[in-house]
Amino acid sequence: MFSFLNKDQQTGEVAELQLDEQNIPAHIAIIMDGNGRWAQQRHLPRIAGHKQGMNTVKTVAKAASHLGVKVLTLYAFSTENWKRPTAEVNYLMKLPVDFFGTFVPDLVKNNIRVKVMGYTDQLPAATQKAVHDAIEDTKDCTGMVLNFALNYGGRAEIVTAVQSLAQQVQAGQLDPTAIDEARLGQQLMTSDLGDLQDPDLLIRTSGEERLSNFMLWQVAYSEFVFMDLHWPDFDQTTLEQAIYQYQQRHRRFGGLTN
């Protein structure tokens, strides 16, 4: 059993809670929201929040691996984020270079393998190289998969999958009646995760309660946990609190349980 201290936000009382190590979500997905607001509250530029958020990723990745999570998917940059101010976008594009440049040795040490999903061919050359190198440097790791959604959009992913199936039908390689959920799922960017492609738990920070075009197909039966704190304040204890909430729920997948 994993134990952690939990502080009640209303009463201030601290209690020791225990996680069931046999019920750790195999795949956790996180919408890392609130970097900019975290910085603004401290009268800092928004990029300071993104920098601190990068450090949080390092902390949470190692914590998740230690807890036995098999896949951790992080929403790093969406297809809509290009609409942000140019200076901020440019900084965000440099973050993977800095992140992987300093963290890959720790990833290897912790047996964590890097995966990236999204339209990475549209990223700047230096960002693409950092991503490629990190994937290559960790390819032999057999532990947790740290999966970054980078230049990713859920609707675009589904459209791309449908286009691929349509091309197979047009080429006479696929009967339209053979298209089902499983076959469409094989065309998604998470297909190489096999049985782990659908998150068990989706966490969103910063108090927002929406998906923001993230893994729209894969989260059909995920448990959602929304947390008020901003991403830079997220840590191992917060992760454990989210998992604890997950463990209090009964997943029925549309059926009934006794």
Image (cartoon, helix red, strand yellow):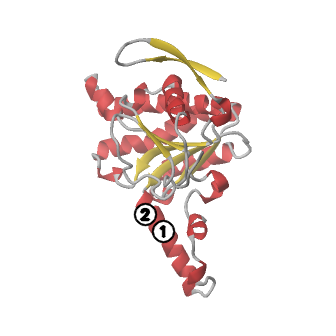
Residue 209 falls left or right of residue 201: left
Query: Which quadrant of the structure image shows residue 188?
Result: bottom right
The residue at 65%/41% (across/down) is: 70
Relative image position of residue 96 (x, y in whole percent):
50, 41
Mark 1 is on which residue type? Thr
Q: Tell which of 61 and 185 is nearer to you.
A: 185
Secondary structure type for disc 1: helix
Numbered label attached to residue 156: 2
How many C-alpha atoms fall within 10 Å of the one at disc 1: few (<14), some, or many (≥20)?
some
Q: Are marks 1 and 2 in contact (CB under 8 Å)?
A: yes
**Circle 1 sits on which residue?**
160
The residue at 55%/55% (across/down) is: 255
Relative image position of residue 68 (x, y in whole percent):
66, 34
Relative image position of residue 75 (x, y in whole percent):
46, 45
Residue 160 vertical placement versus 142 (above, below) = below
Residue 165 falls left or right of residue 39: right
